[in-house]
């Protein structure tokens, strides 16, 4: 009991700043520890089956580098002895072993931001290849910015430091975690009935999880009624008391969803005391010992656990690629002001239930990787990208990223598919590729019709990821593509700046295409939130045809001659809008923001007809997709001691590869050779 009380006190502190930290576990990490990775072992394992910021500008790749063979990566944090961070250190040390690098896990044992900043500065003095920073507090922003400006690569983990110059954020997609929890709870109660949710009210990442629960109930389970959101202040005793009060008013309450561990422990305690075990369904969050024991005892039905080890592993892997082999997004990344890093990585979640709970306890020595096989690629190891429209200029960058990854990793690559938009031919190519049993498959997710073949590959034990457009509900491991809603936000900000924050605008899109609809929504949300004096007067459907875009815009201008600007969410719209502006002598008067980097768009930007374009970092999609599958095959991160037995894979859920703003100053760098 004394141990549990101490655990709760510790949790109260950390939950205030960071979601989902576990109650005390064995083998806490020391405050600072350096490890030197041994060379990889040559044993073979079969392939496993299966967030918003402006583009960064820091020249991170210019950081002074350690000599080859002297790579050094840090993780800087506070509360270094907190058991939650066991998994962070697992990911860091495992990355060190996989990359043959030294690693250091540094920072104060207390929640002391001044001491943590001092640790970051001391780490920078050691000439590191990169620093992972747990984003506890906005007070870290100046220190992060100073490091990046000095050429030290920095990524943030677990919690975001908004507005900082970090290169990438890696953490759990909190809204999606809520969606997963909401669906599980709904299924447990038969899709109907009254439920309560337990959270710490006002904490942004927990609010996102609550929003995920609500979204699922509203859209998928209309017969579920949310009767109360209980504020437990990250205190399991308050969670228990709050739930008891709700049950007095709502004795027929069917279920409880908890978005952090204290809520789950509190709900389970109340359920036991009131004799409701098995009747009141409970879904919790994370993998602390208390939660796992309640799951094994049948008091908690499930918990949504974060893949925390993936945050530091992939953060370190990304920085290693940036420093030692940066993928060329354009011919000269530095001149074009492009950092070849993704915007964000959602490391995903895993569901714990009675069947697998025992596998989620930490081992006595979680940093012992002697049972993890590290392997070398075989001579004929091949990664294949399957798509349609293979001759389309847009896919130059897909092929570039694929081949660049192959060269870096010492594996073969193939780029295959029909030259036309022919889904039957693409599916046939995918089926032929599956029959060849490659080491990994990348699929451009043009159409839902691809789902059965993607699932077939996954069921056959072939790692498979989707690129550029998602195939919803498929068994792909990871989706890699532009965060489309964020791309819309970026475009909307650019357009708003061009028209002085007020006036009438039109948007041009291909109506009904999911990724473009998300970009349109980004425009709408940005205007609604920050530019109330901007009015969207028309959304023009150009059917991805620049001539139809031009005609549609001309028709709008006849009705609304004082139109101030046009936002276009794909390249055909931008070219069409520019054509119309030239023909109607509106160049410079009608402001145009386009999308992507085709030659026509770039020429219109150089000529001042289009003011800017939001370009995708397309090469990162195939590059990172290939690299992630390679490490899954040759150095699978031990998220738990036995990933396969626990029903999880060491891959992230999704990667937002980010955007770049093209304007007259840098347009010349974006042409393909």
Image: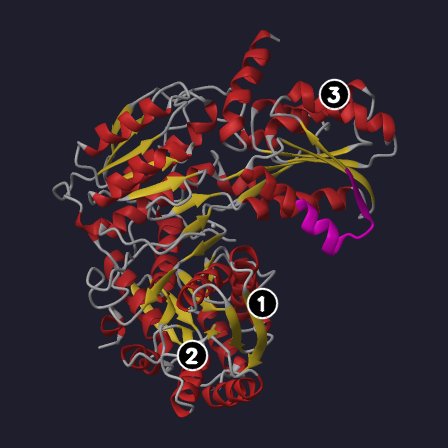
**Residue 345 in view of the camera:** yes
Q: Left or right: 151 with respect to 48?
A: left
Q: Which of the 4 image quarters holds residue 11?
A: top right
Disc on res. 590 = 2
Q: Is residue 658 above or below residue 13?
A: below
Among the two numbered marks 1 and 2 on one chain, the one whose residue lies closer to the N terminus? 1
What's the residue at 61%, 60% (across, down)? 473
User: x and y percent of residue 313 in the render?
Assistant: 37, 41
Q: Which mark is residue 241?
A: 3
Classify residue 316 as left or right of residue 59: right
Say which element carries label 1.
helix
Residue 524, compared with residue 89, is above or below; it is: below
> Whole-percent x and y of residue 417?
43, 78
Foreground mark, 3 or 1? 3
Local crowd size for mark 1, using a 10 Å CA cut-off: few (<14), some (14–19), many (≥20): some
Verify CB contact (< 8 Å) between mark 1 and mark 2. no
Disc 3 crowd rating (10 Å Cα; few below 14, some 14-19, many 20+) is: some
CB contact under 8 Å: marks 3 and 1: no
The answer to which of 279 and 20 lies nearer the viewer is 20
Is 558 situated above or below 257? below
Q: Quadrant of residue 498?
A: bottom left
Check the image and report above or below for 568 versus 631.
below
The residue closer to the viewer here, 124 or 310, is 124
| Residue pictured at 64% horizontal, 42% vertical | 210
Counting other residues with Cα less than 10 Å from the Cα at mark 2, is it few (<14), some (14-19), or many (20 or more)?
A: many
In the rendered image, residue 207 lying in the magenta stretch gets the answer no
**Label at residue 451:** 1
Question: Which residue is located at x 80 percent, y 42 percent?
Answer: 189
């Amino acid at each position: 009991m004394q141990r549990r009380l101490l655990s709760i006190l510790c949790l109260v502190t950390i939950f205030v700043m960071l979601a989902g930290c576990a109650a005390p576990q064995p083998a806490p990490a020391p405050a600072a520890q350096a490890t030197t990775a041994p060379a990889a072992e040559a044993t073979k394992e079969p392939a496993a089956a299966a967030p918003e910021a402006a583009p960064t500008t820091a020249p991170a790749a210019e950081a002074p580098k350690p000599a080859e063979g002297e790579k050094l990566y840090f993780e800087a944090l506070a509360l270094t002895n907190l058991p939650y961070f066991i998994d962070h250190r697992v990911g860091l040390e495992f990355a060190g072993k996989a990359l043959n690098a030294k690693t250091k896990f540094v920072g104060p044992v207390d929640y002391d931001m001044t001491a943590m900043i001092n640790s970051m500065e001391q780490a920078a003095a050691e000439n590191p290849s990169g620093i992972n920073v747990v984003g506890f507090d906005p007070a870290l922003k100046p220190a992060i910015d100073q490091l990046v400006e000095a050429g030290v690569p920095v990524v943030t983990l677990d919690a975001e430091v908004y507005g900082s110059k970090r290169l990438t954020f890696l953490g759990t997609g909190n809204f999606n975690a809520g969606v997963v929890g909401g669906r599980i709870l709904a299924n447990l109660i038969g899709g109907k009935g009254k439920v309560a949710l337990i959270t710490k009210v006002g904490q942004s990442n927990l609010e996102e999880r609550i929003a995920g629960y609500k979204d699922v109930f509203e859209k998928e389970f209309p017969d579920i009624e949310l009767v109360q959101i209980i504020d437990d202040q990250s205190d399991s005793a308050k969670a228990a008391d709050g739930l008891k009060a709700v049950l007095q008013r709502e004795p027929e309450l069917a279920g409880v969803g908890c978005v952090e561990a204290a809520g789950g422990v509190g709900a389970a305690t109340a359920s036991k005391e009131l004799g409701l075990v098995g009747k009141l369904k409970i879904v919790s969050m994370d993998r602390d010992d208390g939660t796992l024991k309640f799951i094994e005892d049948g008091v908690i039905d499930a918990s949504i656990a974060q893949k925390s080890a993936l945050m530091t592993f992939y953060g370190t892997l990304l920085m290693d690629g940036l420093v030692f082999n940066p993928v060329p997004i354009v011919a000269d990344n530095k001149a074009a002001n492009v950092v070849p890093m993704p915007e964000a990585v959602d490391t995903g979640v895993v569901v714990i239930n009675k069947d697998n709970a025992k596998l989620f306890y930490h081992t006595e020595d979680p940093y012992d990787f002697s049972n993890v096989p590290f392997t070398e690629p075989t001579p004929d190891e091949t990664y294949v990208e399957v798509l349609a429209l293979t001759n389309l200029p847009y896919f130059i960058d897909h092929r570039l990223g694929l081949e660049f990854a192959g060269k870096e990793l010492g594996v073969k690559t193939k780029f295959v598919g029909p030259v036309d938009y022919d889904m039957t031919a693409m599916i046939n190519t995918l089926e032929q590729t599956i029959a060849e049993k490659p080491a990994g498959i990348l699929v451009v997710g043009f159409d839902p019709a691809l789902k059965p073949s993607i699932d077939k590959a996954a069921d056959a034990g072939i790692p498979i990821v989707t690129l550029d457009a998602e195939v919803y509900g498929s068994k792909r491991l990871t989706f890699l593509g532009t965060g489309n809603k964020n791309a819309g936000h970026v475009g909307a900000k650019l357009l708003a700046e061009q028209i002085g924050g007020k006036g009438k605008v039109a948007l041009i899109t291909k109506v009904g295409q999911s990724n473009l609809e998300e970009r349109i929504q980004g425009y709408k949300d940005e205007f609604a939130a920050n530019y109330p004096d901007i009015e969207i007067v028309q959304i023009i459907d150009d059917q991805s045809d620049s001539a139809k875009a031009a005609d549609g815009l001309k028709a709008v201008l006849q009705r609304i001659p004082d139109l101030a600007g046009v936002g276009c969410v794909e390249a055909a719209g931008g070219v069409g809008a520019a054509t119309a502006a030239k023909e109607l002598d509106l160049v410079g008067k009608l402001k145009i923001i386009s999308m992507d980097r085709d030659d026509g768009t770039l020429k219109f930007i150089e000529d001042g007809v289009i003011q800017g374009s939001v370009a995708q970092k397309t090469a990162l999609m195939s590059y990172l997709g290939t690299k992630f599958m390679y490490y899954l095959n040759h150095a699978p991160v031990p998220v738990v001691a036995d990933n396969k037995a626990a029903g999880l894979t060491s891959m992230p859920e999704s990667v937002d590869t980010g955007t770049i703003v093209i304007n007259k100053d840098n347009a010349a760098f974006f042409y393909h050779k």
